[in-house]
Each structure stands twice: as structure tokens, then as C-alpha cells.
Image: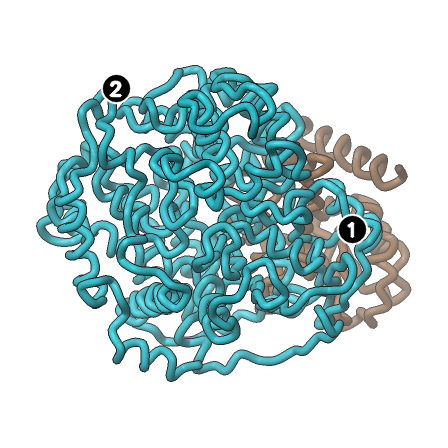
Chain colours: A brown, B cyan
Amino acid sequence: MKYLYAFPEKCTGCRECTLACSLKFFGECNPKKAAISVIRDEFRRYEYPMICYQCEDPVCLKYCHQNAYEIVDGVVIRDDDRCIGCRMCAVLCPYNAISAIDGEIIKCDLCDGDPKCVKYCSTEAIQYLDETDELEARRKQMAERVLGIASD
Amino acid sequence: MTKGNVKITETPEEIRRLFLGGRGLNGYYLYKMMKPGMDPLSPDNVLIFGTGLLSGTLIPNSSRFSVTARSPETGFFGDANCGGYFSAELRYAGFDRIIVLGKADRPSYLHVHDGEIEIMDAVDYWGMDTTDVQLALRKDLGHVESAVCGVAGENLVRFACVRTGIKNAAGRCGLGAVMGSKNLKAIAARGRGGVEIANPDEMFEVCEELKDYIMGSKITSILGTVGTPLLYEVSNALGAIRTKNSQLNAWSDSLNADEIEKHVDKMISCSSCIVHCRHRNSLGGEGPEYTALGLLGSNLGIEDPAEVIELNNVCNELGLDISSSGTYLAWAYELYERGIIGKDMTGEDLRFGDFDLSRRLLHDISRREGFGDIVAEGSLNFERYGPESKDYLIAVKGLPQSDPHDVRYIKAFALGIATASRGADHLRSRPTLEIFLKLPPEVKQRIYGEGVNNDPASYEAKEKSVYFSDNMFASIDTVGICKFICHGFNSPHFVDYSWLTRLIHAAVGWDYTEADIEAVGKRVIDMERMFNIREGLTMADDTLPKRYFDDPSKLKIAKGHHIDRKEFDGMLSRYYELRNWTEDGMVKPERRAELEGYL
């Protein structure tokens, strides 16, 4: 199974990934209206791509009272027809990976296996790779780190 | 600002199509709205922040905006281009351009958010350095992107810059002082909107192609690894690095890119940038660029890269233009050494190579204390320093040369800084390919024009190199794309008129030919020339520092080279002819009537 993996140490903060994502979904360039975001602060010196971790036990799925989420081949998919736009998933996602803006819920579906964000990353800070134990360990570690930052 | 009013209007599409945006529309509005002969530091100045037509989009390196006003440093067209995240955010907040008129009765800032502009009280922010004020704005307003002035701008230092982020600056022409004169500390923008794209599929297609093209270039990976400091070594090897106020033309290898790299933590980007040439340095700031290495290093006689980086960081925090600061300090140091100015004026010994002195003076300039208060007047000091002093200032039209590149060897560079609309500056028209000695003559001629001599020291047809670059760079400045991916700036490839036709069609849906876009560039340049002529410019202002004419370079390949006055005059006349200006460099009446017809 292939997943997105983020390498923040390589991220330069340019946000091309987010712009490509918003352009694909909405025909506009808007870094806040995308299924991926880059948390960056030049003063505090960090750039961090926030991606959907396609959790094994995702809160978006667990708490959706419309059952709009399901896991298909390891990818957490939102069904637009079932979704009523309540934004519960966006509020609950601990990784801030689901956006709710202008009445739209935006959730990464890995672009059916050809993620635009990866294509536009010029430094390989986001990669679409076959999962390995090492990558998975890294991904879990990063997810925990994000949770740590969030709880700070 | 005087009345505390905000008015929101649309620019007519006809005018947008003629000037596109950024520097182009800024120049149009400045010419239209500014009365001639007004004091640049009075409420009569018109201060314009304008995003590029393509800013904030997926298009690589589309991060730029321009700031424009009558320059308090030169009295001529004042304009500076800047990267970072402000331009994109201003568009996401719903605005392409902000025109600031009058003067607020108290320190103020503009809060721009989701289609609204509010004039806010900035009393608590006044007196803050550029980083502190941006942090304070974020604390109070959330994650805004801000364009601010530093203490230097508040104190009307004539070469104060506009800053955004750690080091991105609309550096040139003293536009930070114009902010200060209007009691405007900052414009803080934040928006949830996006930039609508006319043809999304086409945008993906052209951007993917362009990205691969740019990423495949060697210069991209070099710029992304070491940034502009790579140019220091190139210029220094030629004997073309401004050293100790251009008394010398070569300096220490200690400022080479591989030495600078030791102080770099990470390379980072502006919005949409795939080149990532910005250094996050280990001394708490960003940079240095090649400009800082030259003007705060070799030009001040400083060899230690850590000291240069520190001076660079100080300028950024205070909001001082690095090129002007390094030039004015070196000018004063030489005048002192020559006895043209004395201790009665300076209050202390001035000398090259003294890091502490330079650092202290930068602080004094920004706060207008002691001798710093005098230096803060920039090139207006001719009178105070005495008539002889003029011969030693490396400036054109009152604007210190931006580029640390000593132009005595490469003749086209000399013509470029002599004719650039804002004064001595390499970002308007530097025909960089002249420096690539190994570039085949046919490549250079294909780009610059027939008959351009391949020898950089030749004057033959060099007006064509400048003319080409002038038009190309003006066009790119209207769309908000960085010059680092502009055809002819760093490479014989990259975004040219053909790419621009495709990018504009994808983003906005307008059909342009390559000639149409070149015509935009020419229109922009003529409009800026008209502004300058209206403020009193004559052909005598299209000249060079005396030293470049009369003192041959002393070291390395450039040894013995200087600019021959007669040859220079010939090159200048031929340039005027190409521009279709009159023999004395004026815009012809019919052209003026045409452009004024759009006002």
C-alpha cells in the first residue's frame, strides 16, 4: 500500500502542494482550501507539511454520525453524498488534516493514486511511497510529534 | 490616511490589459495620481503596494509585489519589488493593490482581511524593529502576512526599506521612509479567499512543464543550494567586486559561497517558489545575499562572513536598504580618509574594516543620532560633504548602485545602471548573460540581438543587451514572477514572452502574443521615463559615477578597464534610438499623448 510521507526537514514552505490541491478540487489557488496544509513560521523557524495520515482507526470515521467515511484499500474516503457538512470531522481531526471552508469539507483521497501535491513538491518533502516498517515507524513518530505540538 | 477613509474600486479591464499589474499598474497609478514637484516625504506622495497579475497562484515563483512612490532618496521614480508571502496573502484577502494617500494623524496600520480594509491604531507598534512588529501583529490578529517599516522608516531615513518576513524587502528608493512619513507602520493581510484560475487544466499542464524545465536547469540547483552568494566568486574572479568604495575591485575569498554555507541552517522559499534561494542563517536571521556580501563586506573592508551576516541582520531588523547603507557608509569612510569630511562632522574616526563602527553607525542612522543623522540623508549629502564628494559616490540619479558588481569591465552592465528608471540598479536591466564568457556568440546574439559583441569589454551593440533585458524584466515585474526564473536574468533559458503568453492565458484567460507582452514592458518603461522627466530628469542623469569613467580598475582580469566617455555616449545614443526616445532621451510627444490618453 502506498501512502503520503512528509519530510519536514526538506520542506521550504512554498505551499505549491496546497495550491495544486486547491486548484484540482476547486479551480482556485488557495492554500487554506486544500486537503494538505503547510504550517510555517519563518520567525520561529519551521516548515511542516500537514498531511492526512490515513489513520487505521480514524476519528473522522469513528465520529461521523452520517457514516460518510469508509476505509477503501487503506485510504480513508469521504462520501460527498452522505456528508451533510457538519464539520465534526474537521474539528476532531487531531492532525488538522481535514479542512472546512466556504461550506466545503476537504479530505485527502490520495488523488486516486496520483497525488498532485507530490508532483508539485520540488524538494521531495512530500513523497508517495510503498509503506515499509521504517516509514511507518517514522510516520507514527511524526504523528505523535504533531499531537505533542498541538497539545502544547 | 488624512481623512481616515477607505475607498475600494476596480481597475478597468482595458487598463489592466495594458499594464497587467505589479510594477506596471503601480507606475500607471503613480503617474496618474501624483502631482509633480511634491516633497516625497509629504502627505502628497502616493504610496502604492501592488501584487503581480499572477501572484499567489500555482505558477512557480509567483510571490512578488511592487511598492512604488516618488523616491525620497532620489526625487525620481521610486519602485521596489519584493518576495515573501505578503503578495499572495493580499490577493487571498481580496485585493490586488493598495494605494495610500495623505498622512494619518497618528501611527497607524492597515488591517486587510477578506474584502475589508481597516485603518487601525499602531501607537503600540511604533518604535518596534521589523521582526518584533510582525510578531506583535500576529499575536494580535492571527497569522497575518505583513509589509512593515522599521525604525529607519519611522525616522524618515531616506533609504529605509519596506520589509516582510525576516529579510524580504522592497529595499530600494527609500519607500520605508514614505511609509514613515504617512505614519503607516504596517499593512497586515490575511484572507481565506483564493485566486480564481480561468483554465485550471491548462494551468496544471503549463505549470508542470515549466516546473520540470526550471528544475532541470543547473543554475536552479545551485541557487537552491547556496543562493546568490555564488555570484560573489564569479564577480571577484573577474575583478569586478566593489571594494572599499570602488577604490579596489577585488576582495577576499573568505566571502565565497562555500564559506557562507557554513552559516546556513536551511534553504527556504517564498510563496510558490521552487528555487528556494533564501538562507536561514545560524545567526538568527536570513541571508546574506550576494548584495550584502559585497556592500556590507568587501565595500566596507570586512572579511569575516559572520560579521557580514550580522550587519545584514542588523539592516533587516532596522529596515534599512542594504545596498544603499553599504554604499553610503563606504562613501563616508573614503571621504574621511581623504580629509574631505572631518571629525568635526563625524565625531569619530571613520575607517574601513571596522565591524563595530559599521554596526554602530547602522543603528545611529536608523535612529538619526550623531553622524548617523547626517548619513540618513543619503545622496542629498553632496552639499554638506562638499562638491568634491560627488565624485566618490557610487550612485546614479542619487541611488547607490544595488549590485556589488563593479561595472568598469562589463560595458553593458554600465549602460544598464546608467539608464535604469530608478537609478543605479541591476534588477531593472542587467544583461547577465554578458558575464558568461563561454556562452557561444550565436546564443547571445539570438537572445540580445544581432551584432552584440561576445566580448564583455566591448561596447559594440551593447545597447541591444540592455534594451532586451529592460523590456523582459519590466514585463516579468508586472506579473509578480521572480527574476530568478526570468529569461536572461540568471540563465539563457527560463520564463520568456512565450511562457508568459501561456501562463497568462491559463490564469486569466487573456490571449496575448509574445509581442503584446513585450509591448507591456515597453509601455511600463516609457511611463516611468515620463514620470522622471516630469520630475526634472534630463539625459545628464543617465550617467555613471565618475570613478567608473576615470579610474581604471586595478586588479585581476578587469585591470586597466574603465568606461570610455565617448564610447559610453555612443552606446547611450543608440539605446535612446532603440527605445524610440528623442536624441536627448525624452519620450516623444506622440508616445506621451498615447500613454496619457489612458489616464
Q: Secondary structure at mark 1?
A: helix
Q: Nearer the viewer, residue B266 or B229?
A: B229
Q: What residue lies at 60% left-to-right and 35% top-to-bottom?
A: B315
Quadrant of the snapshot with the N terminus of chain B? bottom right
Q: Nearer the viewer, residue A105 or B304?
A: B304
Q: What residue lies at 81% left-to-right and 34% top-to-bottom?
A: A144
**Disc 1: which chain?**
B
Residue B555, numbered circle: 2
Q: Nearer the viewer, residue B424 or B499?
A: B424
Q: Say if B506 sits above or below B563 in the image.
A: below
Residue B245, numbered circle: none
The percent coordinates of residue B174 (x first, y second) are 54, 50
**Residue, disc 1:** B137
- Does residue B332 appear to the left or right of B128 in the view shown? left
Residue A17 visible in this rendered orientation of the protein: no
Quarter of the image for residue A65 reads bottom right
Whole-Å distance between the Cαs marked 2 and 1?
49 Å
Residue B123 visible in this rendered orientation of the protein: yes
The percent coordinates of residue A83 (x first, y second) are 80, 69
Quarter of the image for residue B239 reads top left
The percent coordinates of residue B330 (x first, y second) are 46, 28
Q: What residue lies at 23% left-to-right and 44% top-to-bottom?
A: B412
Amino acid type, callout 2 = Leu
